[in-house]
Amino acid sequence: MKSVKKSDVKIAVLRIEGTNCEQESLDAFKRLGANPEFVHLKQLLHLDCTKNEKRDIFNYQCIMIPGGFSAGDYIRAGAIFAARIKSKLGKDLEEFVKQEYPVLGVCNGFQVLTELGLLPGIKEIMTSVPDACLYINDSNRYECRPTFLKHENNIKCIFTRKIPKDDILLIPSAHAEGKLLFTLDKQEEYLKKLEENDQIVFRYINKNGEYTGYPWNPNGSISNLAGICNYIGNVFGMMPHPERSFYRHQHPNWVQNGLDNNIGDGIAIFESALDYICKRF
Amino acid sequence: MNIDKLFNRKTDKFECYEIDVFSASDAELVEISNKMGLALALPEMKNIQSYFKNKNRLPTDIELQALGQAWSEHCCYKSSKIPLKKYVFGIAEDKIVAREDAGIIDFDKDHYYCAALESHNHPSAVEPYGGAATGVGGIVRDVLCMGAQPIAYIDPLFFGPLDLPQSELPKGVKHPRFLFKGVVDGIRDYGNRIGIPTLSGQVYFHKGYTSNCLVNVGCIGILKKEELIHSWAKAPGNVYVYVGGKTGRDGIHGVTFASAELKDDSEKSSRSAVQVGDPITKEPVIHATLECNRKGLLEGLKDFGGGGLSCVSGELAYAAGFGAEIVLDDVPLKEEGLLPWEIWISESQERMMFLVAPKNVNEVLHICKQWDVTAAVVGQVIAEKITRVIYKGVKILEMDMDFFTGGPVYDTCQRPFVISTQKENIDPKFDMQNLNDILKKLLGSFNIASKEWVIRQYDHEVRGNTVIKPLQGKINFECNGDATVLKPLEESFRGLAVTANINPRFMERDPYWGACSAIDETCRNLVSVGAIPDSLLDCLNFGNPEKPEKMGEFYEACRGLGDAARELNLPYMSGNVSLYNESVKTSVPPTPQIMGIGIVPDIRKCVTSDFKKQSNYIYLVGKETDKEMGGSEYYNVIKVDGGVVPKTDINILKNYMKAILMAIDKKQIVSCHDISEGGLGVCISEMCIGGDIGAQINLSNVSKNLRSDFKLFSESNTRWVVEVEKEKQKNFEKTLKENKTPFVKIGEIKSDKIVIEDNGKKIIDQKISNLRDIWKNTIWNIMG
């Protein structure tokens, strides 16, 4: 079985105007010894680029769409970024996912993946129109707060394979539009499918591990969903920010609980992806 | 008065007038200033008149507009220079590496930190959302133009009372609730979108801010030492490259608007003075600017601030002893039909000016293009010390740099001031009420109640560097912290702590001791998390300086800020003066907002304000608690007028700070909170709320002669409450004794109630969950 060296794993941290969590996202992969780089969407579209600046999606083994307010999130969060990707790169991206390369979307990135039709990805890789949406929080405002997540994926999601099932993670959320919704007539069916397909990854819980409402579930997301993957397990989106809890000292309660070895709860997501890539390609 | 006859069209190519200031009478000169919105007084107009008489030609409208901008109160501090020079400048100057749009100080061997603080008051009073948003944009540019990556944003806000009855709202004034919401929305939508965490601030409510809210904005940045860039030209031939947002009619006369009192009709008359912010233009401008600077492509850098293109191009050249030649035709415009003077002084947002060597221009334009950022060559630096502007081939402005940008010197024309006699200091006698009720009232008062409603709307985590958060404690039970701590560098555990303070009630009673108290509190806050105070920033918000008593308040505040900082050897690395914060009805209390920055040698040793563990000891550390009740929240809540404002002794503060810092460094303290508004009672309550844990307290050994209510609610300076583990007791007490720092062991952490006794009598007995509900819900309930 062939395997890639970690330092050879190339990751595209994709950005446009208004993307703003790219530095810490890049740092997360870099700290683990991989080879991430910032890629402006125009570099993939070959717009206003010199020869050296042009990139191709298949130069990379992983694409990450970080958090932020791409194109201002005017219209609907993630919609403009998704439209720009889909119009020129839709086919390539579909092929990329088909070849089982991992794609990660955090916060705004999750919104983009949903707008692209890559998530929830229940039956097909990419739907022509979005199959879900991340709607305005129940509180009707942007909120930045720590959230507890329960890992509920059995094996499918390649981004959480290093996290034992039922583990509780403390990862902060910061968004105005994070309430995952499906069309009303498909709601029950989709939830069932997600469950059956092992596509549910994270749910919001309270400090005692119970499913509860606000503020533990910061947005009112259906079935407390915080993160889901597609049916293959290689496209994963979550609203909370694992790159903001890479180290223990980024946690809001490290002063109370100590730093120990300074490993944060978010690190396993990046480790799992690299582990998968190294073994798979 | 009709002065149209004095305006003569200069050319038929476009609209530009020559103004006949030679034949104008004094009254007409003043009318010219008014009509054109210049905000220049008669002596200044006469100064201009004689300058052009020497030149033997009439000034153009664009020349007068440019002078109005360059000489305004906002740009060159004409009222404030003398007291600032006398008291505030020149403290620990050796620490300051540079002081331009932002100050620069060493962070470690290879890095500087950079910070700026300014006001955005008048625009926010007229249009809270846009005003506050552009305030964020402006201060971020100030840090950016030093070559620094912005890493934190700080926003102290001051409004009228949230429950002000509509009937008491003056005509033309917006309700404090509306302003509060609008300002917070504006900061949130702009700050969150550009990806810079909002880390600290202050929200204060007081009647004096009803018709003139204050919105102060601060920003911190970090940079490698070799990346520092200055706001001046390197050589003639440097090319002016205009970068960022396009120029429009928004923000015309912003500077002159800020230098006059607000009026009933400011809404209508001054709406165009408020700029329109666009964070999604700004965000890539930050990237493009930093990328160009890191690649060494820039010779000089400055942001467009007050006075727009006029000030930025002039100052870049003037600072280096050169001149500027600008071609207005090439300035990117939002719309057709702007008059040349409007292009020249517009304060449209999101604009930076790069100075670039000719050989690098193409690369700079390419980088901007990649980020979809507008960029255009608009002129060049010239050897002659003049500013020249050309439009459609016609020279429409040509003035000597020394006259135009240098500005008139006002040191000799001092504004009159009177230092008013102190307010009534005598304490009225009154009976002590039920202290449980008072404590609950205090926790539910707008100035003490939790500001979670605001804090959670701001992204304080983006960039992943926030290691001590603004809210501290058990998840979803947090209390407010004293300071927030950032770990700005990937490879180092060195941290930056930040806090912002002022107590306007102290200030209105006693500007001198109020100012000293602000410095004391700033230091206390920094020390509470384990940070060594390193520098200060001041944003001096005051009333109309033409009124001698307002000028007197300004003098006294400056004296206090100077005395305290000098003794501590803390420099004011940057600051801003905002005068005329009054309307016909009210004037703001003197509000010298202080932002403090501290260095944390190792963030892994930081402590927070929430109580941690059952049966740990609780200490009151610091100065004797005195009956210094003037301006206290206690007196405000029970509506008592009188009392003295807390005094401070900086030498004592220095010792006590050292003791606390040493104890934190030796890990003898597990939580620490400074005592400020609401005194010891509120301080302990907050620590219990954050830790979701109770406390058993006995105050019998605290200032023995003091009545229980004064013990609980006095706001005497230089005091902290700390939590110490039992096994650390001996070592902790030893550290304090070695540093001559008084302490009283007042109790221990216990149960889920806060119980306070004094001289054998139970004075407080409250469930923590009850206190939390009051403290946490007050602002949520009113703001929704």
Image (cartoon, coloured by chain):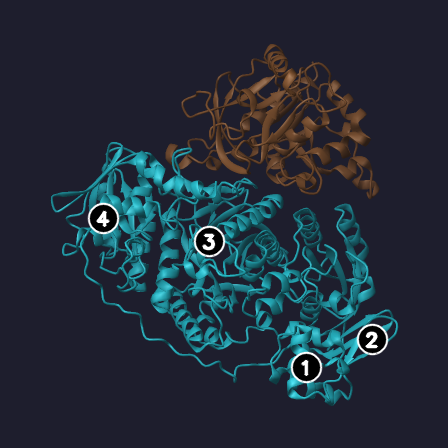
Looking at the rendered image, the quarter that the N terminus of chain B falls into is bottom right
Q: Identify the image quadrant of residue B738.
A: bottom left
In this figure, which residue is indicated by the disc labeled 4?
B734
Mark 3 belongs to which amino acid?
A: Gln
Which chain is depicted brown?
A: A
Q: Residue at x 51, y 76 (%)?
A: B79
Q: Quote the CA–CA distance across marks 4 and 2.
A: 76 Å
Within-10-Å neighbours for mark 3: few <14, some 14–19, many 20+:
few
Which chain is depicted cyan?
A: B
SS state under label 4: helix
Q: Are marks 3 and 1 in contact (CB under 8 Å)?
A: no
Q: Are marks 1 and 2 in contact (CB under 8 Å)?
A: no
Q: Earlier in the sequence, mark 1 or mark 2?
A: 1
SS state under label 2: strand
Q: Identify the image quadrant of residue B756.
A: top left
Whether labels 1 and 2 belong to a single chain: the reply is: yes
Foreground mark, 4 or 2, reads 2
Q: Are marks 4 and 3 in contact (CB under 8 Å)?
A: no
